[in-house]
Amino acid sequence: MKNQELTNDENKIKFSKILKEKINKGFVIEERNDKLPFAVLSKKGIKVNHNINFLFSCATLGLWSIPWMYRSFISSREQRILVAIDEDGNAFEDKCYN
C-alpha cells in the first residue's frame, strides 16, 4: 500500500514538472485533472506581418520566402496538446485535433 502511494506521489511530482516546463514555453492550461493526471494545454499562434516579410523576401531575392511560408502556415496556428501520465508512470504528449 505504501509503495503504491509513493508511486502516486512520484507521478504527481513528474506531472507537475512537465506542466511547469510547458507553461514556461508559453502554453496555458485549459483543462486539468489530477486524479488521472492529464492536462490539455494550448498556445496561441504568432501573428505574421506579411508586409515586412514581403519586403524581406524582395531584398533577399526570394530566399526569405521559405521562413515566411513556415511562419504563415505552421507557426501562426494555435497549438493544443494533451500531456498525461499513463498507468505505468510514463509521461506522454499528444496533439489535440480540433
Image (tube, rainbow, N blue to C red):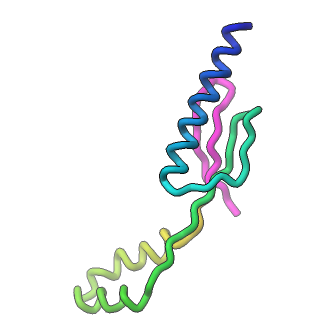
Residue drawn at the location 48% of the way across and 53% of the way down: 25
Residue drawn at the location 30% of the way across and 81% of the way down: 64
Q: Quadrant of the C terminus?
A: bottom right
x and y, in percent, of residue 53 in the image: 36, 85
41 in the magenta segment = no
Residue drawn at the location 44% of the way across and 85% of the way down: 49
**89 left or right of 73 in image:** right
- Location of residue 87 with respect to 43 vertically, above or below: above
x and y, in percent, of residue 86 in the image: 66, 31
The quarter of the picture where residue 32 lies is top right
The quarter of the picture where residue 93 lies is top right
x and y, in percent, of residue 21 in the image: 50, 44
Residue drawn at the location 57% of the way across and 30% of the way down: 14
- Location of residue 46 with respect to 59 vertically, above or below: above
- Location of residue 39 with respect to 72 vertically, above or below: above
94 in the magenta segment = yes
The magenta span reads: 80-98
- Location of residue 53 with respect to 39 vertically, above or below: below
Q: Which residue occupies the foreground of this view, 83 or 66?
A: 83
Q: Quadrant of the N terminus?
A: top right
In the displayed image of the protein, which residue is found farthest to the left? 60
x and y, in percent, of residue 29 in the image: 65, 52
Could you tell me how many numbered marks the image carries?
0
